[in-house]
Image (cartoon, rainbow, N blue to C red):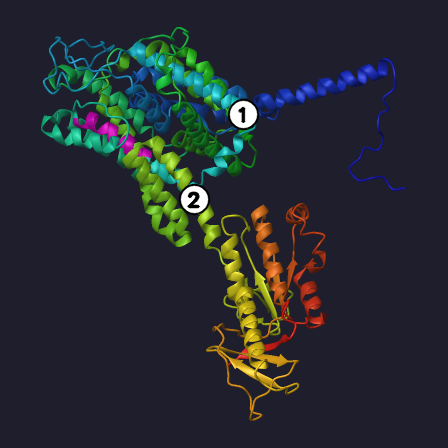
Amino acid sequence: MPKAVGFPRTVPKITKGRNCKETMLHLRQKSAKARLKRLVPMIRIMKKYNWNTDFIADMICGLTVGIMQLPQGMAYAMLAEMPPVVGLYISFFPVLIYFIFGSSRHISMGTVAVVSLLTGSVVAKFYVDDNGGNRDTLIGNSSLIGNGTLDPFEDSNSEPFLSDSKKLGIAMTISLLVGFTQIIMGVLRLGFVTTYMSDPLIAGFTTGTAVHVGTSQVKYILGLNIPRTDGLFQVVKTYKFIFERITHTNVATLIVSLICIVILYLVKVQINQRFKAKLKIPVPIELFVVIVGTVTSYFAHFNENYYIKVVGIVPAGLPEPALPSFEGVDKYIADIPIIAIISFAQSVSLAAMMAKKNKYAIDANQELIAYGAGNVFGSFFSCYPYAASVSRSSVQDSAGGKSQIASLFSASMVLIVILWLGPLFESLPNCVLSAIIVVALRSLILQVLELPKIWKTSKYDFYIWVVTCLSATLLHVDYGLMIGLVFSFFTVVLRTQMARPTRLGKITDQNVYKDPKKYLQTSQLSNEVKLIGYNFPIYFANGDLFVREVYRLSTIKPEVLRKQVLRASLKRESLGRSTTSISNMGTNIGSNNAIVEIQRHDSIASTNGQLPEIYDINPFEFEIPLTHIIIDLLAVSFVDSVGCKVIKTLIEDYENVHVRVYLTNISDEIWNVFEATEIIPARKDIMFVSLDDAIEAARTDSKPDIRENGLSKVDLVHVKPK
């Protein structure tokens, strides 16, 4: 007997006693190792790591990304209403955890604009404005110039204050709760949730978020002090305050901002992007701008002489571990799942793209656990939630990174700054960091240019993009995501409701049936058989539409036909009571659009032996004789209970007018539903494996005895155009 393919030639026997125990122990150890490798992908990745070649590539790549981490970390921390040094903490602590638990080899974790903005929105809910002058003092309050004099460009009552300790307590709590949420989602295998976020939705959402981020930086670029706005119409309120105080613009701050923006744009777009193929690593222009800006500000005394706000005190050394405060958690508990899902969606989509490009696989559920573990760990070290950065990940991939060892080198650079170099950045102007953020948003804003292409591809995707973007921009980031999701689901329902069945014809010399309106070489069957195809599910939302379209394509509506036959019969019986007998005589009863030929089996006569006058019947158009309707269910993905009732009623209605309905290409899932709703086995004789089988059965089937139930004296013989 031949051996089964795929099975081992010898199967170890499990015997009683010591051998059995050893075998079971071996299996348990093997299973435990497999679970450990799934939980800690680093073990599997390091087994295949080539230390001779990959290590050098990761080192160069890590140092390159680390150079980008420094300015971006400090800039995005400002976006989250945090001291700039917090951005450095996020670029170090959570990254170490992701190195252990993450399954992607190329994404760069740390601070990102979207998550920073969401965190800043939560922190803004706790701002208090005591007009009596009792405000919490910010560490390194840059509104005071060197000699303690108040900045003349600042309105002392324009912006509420919140102490750094309270800000950090809120951020740490957010990070802890987001981390637990992501871990629970990973354990419950909920990594699929991002499949409900389509590319147009994500593009529209990120574009709307970019508008919020850019708007939040305008006040730093202009050197204005305006209140932090939050809630609905945040962007509109912010620009209202900006235009109200536009005359208080600090010209020196504006000049520094414009110079930085121009330099960043020219190098990043005209050099790094244009000569990307020739440059092994991109020019680290962000770090160059930060260093030059800091040195210039220090020696020119920007803060004292020109009232340009600077970063202020940057503490040296690692932060002491502390527990989150959980103060006021009830105010933002609803924001936790939103931040968790958005940070996961951005990171896992980027990880999947990098994995596909480099030909390896990631585990979305393991990624959730990795993100959650990093957030939980970072929450004890003054961190807010982290995610994958598009720009840094692209650099890590293009610079030749092979694994997350590159992230260890970038984290090492950040650690050096945290321990020793941090205080050197105290003179860094805030507007320089804002310029870095604004230029980084360019790629997100330019997604608007994709709209014409999206319109040509799918108008539904275009509407999803526009609705999500406008909702996120005008209302709020949170509302934009929720409205976008709801609208996306609505378009799915709308597509099925707008779907129409099509009449099918056979392509010449091929066993394929398509819509004759779209395929030229198609031939129609005889007039007695109609082929109808449907490419969408049949369920509660589109059941009635499906029935109406079948009526239209078949050109016969059973209820109308029954009424016509009934009316013809009643008129015949009324005529028969007042006439003498004339056997086997025919007459034509006409309508506006068709002629229904009635064959009489009883006595009809007139006084002069002529045919009686023609009686009117409600007009109803009959194009061709019809005996069978064949419905192709090949492209129908599912049918719910309402859809089954619709199909069952359709079959019965046509049977009442002696037209048989056949169903073909029924999937296993739909077959099971038909069995559950008792369509099978009662009507098993009308179901066929293929269209050809159904067509052959219709051709060999004798013409139905077209007789209306209860009206046996009237036979409908055939119908033809007038």
Residue in the foreground of this view, choosing between 5 and 481: 481
Residue displayed at 50% across by 33% down: 193
Q: Which residues are magenta?
A: 209-222
Q: Is residue 426 magenta?
A: no
Q: Position of residue 687 (x, y in %)?
A: 68, 58
- Whole-angstrom CA distance, mark 1 to mark 2, is 28 Å
Q: Which residue is mark 1?
A: 186
Please, is residue 101 above or below residue 535 in the view?
above
Which quadrant holds residue 447? top left
Judge whether residue 219 is colored magenta: yes
Query: Nearest the camera: 553 or 117?
Result: 553
Q: Is residue 321 above or below residue 90?
A: above
Give residue 246's mark: none
Which residue is more in the foreground, 237 or 219? Answer: 237
Which residue sits at x=55%, y=31%? 362
Residue highlighted by disc 2 = 490
**Amino acid type, callout 2:** Phe
Q: Position of residue 342 (x, y in %)?
A: 42, 30
Residue 314 seen anywhere in this rendered image of the structure: no
1 or 2: tag closer to the N-terminus? 1
Residue 75: x, y in percent?
A: 30, 23
Local secondary structure at mark 1: helix
**Residue 425, picture quadrant:** top left
Farthest residue toward the front?
Answer: 578
Label 2 CA crowd tier, 10 Å (few <14, some 14–19, many 20+): few
Q: Position of residue 482 (x, y in %)?
A: 39, 34
* Amino acid type, residue under disc 1 in the picture: Gly
Magenta region, mostly helix, strand or loop? helix
Image quadrant in which the N terminus is located: top right
Element carrying mark 2:
helix
